Image (tube, rainbow, N blue to C red):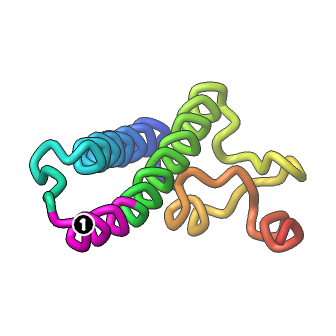
Amino acid sequence: MASPDAIEQRLLRRRSELSQRAEQVGADLRHERDPLVADFADQAIQRSNDEVLREIGDSAKDELRQIDVALRRLAAGQYFICASCGGEIEEARLTALPATTLCATCAQRSR
């Protein structure tokens, strides 16, 4: 199993990537580098693209919240413990989903 320090570094790296992505999405939504064009049809396309950007930004913000929870759980010594049943979260699951709070069994039940 990975050490808590290695896990923390992985979570912090991912958090940094997501923060940069969220900042970039914000800049794109403000059209800082790509101002809205005067043509209404082209502007409609730009606005349509903004909807996709908002979804990307929302997804990044959601994952950032999950990582913050994971970092707090790690600091409290609860990272490897399922928040539902109290059992151990499988190492493979934590590798694939480092911000998960549930073991595979509990995750299946919650679907």
Which residue occupies the foreground of this view, 19 or 53? 53
> Looking at the image, which residue is at 35% across and 59% down?
50
> Looking at the image, which residue is at 31% across and 43% down?
26
Image quadrant containing the C terminus: bottom right
Residue with the most extreme top position: 76
**Residue 53 magenta:** no
Residue 84 visible within the image? yes
Horizontal placement of 2 versus 101: left or right? left
Using a 10 Å C-alpha cutoff, classify the residue at mark 1 as few (fewer than 14 neighbours), some (14 to 19) or many (20 or more): few
Residue bearing the label numbered 1 = 40
Which residue occupies the foreground of this view, 24 or 77? 24
> Looking at the image, which residue is at 49% across and 38% down?
4
Q: Magenta residues, as a range?
A: 39-50
Residue 13 visible within the image? no
Which residue occupies the foreground of this view, 28 or 17? 28
Secondary structure of the magenta portion, mostly?
A: helix
Tell me: residue 95, above or below residue 26. below
Count of numbered circles on the image: 1
Tell me: residue 24, above or below residue 105. above
> Looking at the image, which residue is at 50% across and 62% down?
95
| Whole-percent x, y for residue 13 in the image | 31, 44
Horizontal placement of 44 versus 37: left or right? right
User: Does dot 1 land on a helix, a strand or a loop?
Assistant: helix
| Whole-percent x, y for residue 57 in the image | 41, 51
Horizontal placement of 68 versus 48: left or right? right
Give amino acid for label 1. Phe
| Whole-percent x, y for residue 73 in the image | 64, 34
Residue with the most extreme left position: 33
**Residue 40 magenta:** yes
| Whole-percent x, y for residue 11 in the image | 42, 44
